[in-house]
Image (cartoon, rainbow, N blue to C red):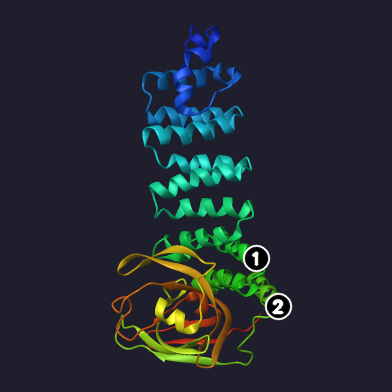
Amino acid sequence: MLVWPAIDARAGYLDENPDQVFAEVYEQLGTKIPQAAARDPVVWTYLSELKRERCDQTSIKNLALALEKIGYRREAGESLYNFVMACGAPVNELHHAINIFLQLSDYSMAIEIADEYIKREPQNANAHYLRAMAFQESGENLKALTDYADSIELFGQDKSKISSVVFMKMARAYATLGRFCEASTPILTWVAYDPLHRDTSQTQRLIFEYNQKGNCAVTTEQAKQRYPLGKRGAVITVKAEINGIKGAFLLDTGATFVTVKSGFADKAGISTADSREITMLTANGPAKGHLTRADKVQLGALAAANVPVVVQKTDERSYGIGIDGLLGMSFLSRFEIQLTDAYVELKTRARK
């Protein structure tokens, strides 16, 4: 919380020229604060503190808040950004700066600052989300998709706590690109994390509209697959086909995407030519993969078209010998999922 300082009536803001007094501060902050703003007694106080202590983190935070309060948002954002560049901290203030430029609709500046944020904290989910929004608003939807995927992957284990806004924005990015089957997938995934509260007429309508636009239906009749669970914590290995190529996969409701090894992707004709790299958090630590799609994924009687897939350069240890990848939520969420202590069951979704 910003605490306004006590003001000395004899302070220099009454008669001194701020351009001269704070010339070195302005140079470091990469901005020139208009005299009307600099003469505000609160702003003057924090500029004076920065003149004495050029890397005072408390002062820069308070200065930015004071500038925002009197309507000088651009100067606030520029000051935060350049302060971090000069002093190396506080990195979290880059978040504040990006939000300012998003509000100003200066998306190129928001992207520049987000690039720096991600450079300094590559596994920060919020940094990727902020850049995704800036990319999306500037019309760069492919880049936005990558950052939305990163923000979801880097969030942590309990993805049910991620705001619906992230998934809805990702869906909109896919839809803007005309990739409607993939557009339904983020919504389906968000619903699948808490179907009791999220499988509503509203989400069903969005999913139905995207599927209609993309002519996405593959499994048209009621069908289901049930897989028994062994001992607690045991993995389920299934036989599935991707683009008509058979493989062995781990059924993983904790994985956001279907993930395949690069060797299998080559056999299945899954192209990564126009894809972008994302980061995934795996049991073996962070791993890189290319976000793309498969034309069709089939598990027994259940099938789905245009499924988001991540292609990963992996070795045999990644999933186990003879395992080609993971069947994650980008496929599984196309169906109703029932988890019990005895089995996992997937069945054709019924429209409400």
Q: Residue flagged by tag 2: what amino acid is it?
A: Gln
The secondary element bearing badge 1 is classed as: loop
The secondary element bearing badge 2 is classed as: helix
Could you say where residue 278 lies in the image, as x and y percent from the top left? 45, 63
Could you say where residue 129 lies in the image, as x and y percent from the top left? 51, 54
Q: What residue do we see at 31% from left, 83% from top?
A: 234
Q: What residue do we see at 56% from left, 18% from top?
A: 40
Q: Residues within 10 Å of mark 1 (few under 14, many from 20)?
A: few
Q: How crowded is mark 2: few (under 14 residues within 10 Å), some or many (20 or more)?
A: few
Q: Is residue 37 above or below residue 134?
A: above
- Quick one: quadrant of the C terminus? bottom right
- Residue 306 quadrant: bottom right
In the image, is 263 to the left or to the right of 18?
left
Between 87 and 334, the one nearer to me in the picture: 87
For the image shown, how many numbered marks are present on the structure? Answer: 2
Between 77 and 254, the one nearer to me in the picture: 77
Q: Residue flagged by tag 1: what amino acid is it?
A: Leu
Q: Is residue 46 visible?
A: no
Label 1 vs label 2, nearer the camera: 1
Q: Which of marks 1 and 2 is nearer the N terminus?
A: 1
Could you say where residue 308 lies in the image, as x and y percent from the top left? 53, 73
Q: Can residue 216 be seen in this view?
A: yes
Mark 1 to mark 2 CA distance (whole Å): 16 Å
Q: Is residue 231 above or below residue 89?
A: below
* Mark number displayed over residue 212: 2
In the image, is 283 to the left or to the right of 213?
left
Q: What residue do we see at 55% from left, 8% from top?
A: 14
Q: What residue do we see at 58% from left, 41% from top?
A: 101
Could you say where residue 13 lies in the image, as x and y percent from the top left? 52, 12
Q: In this view, does 93 lie above or below 301?
A: above
Residue beneath label 1, please? 177
* Mark number displayed over residue 101: none
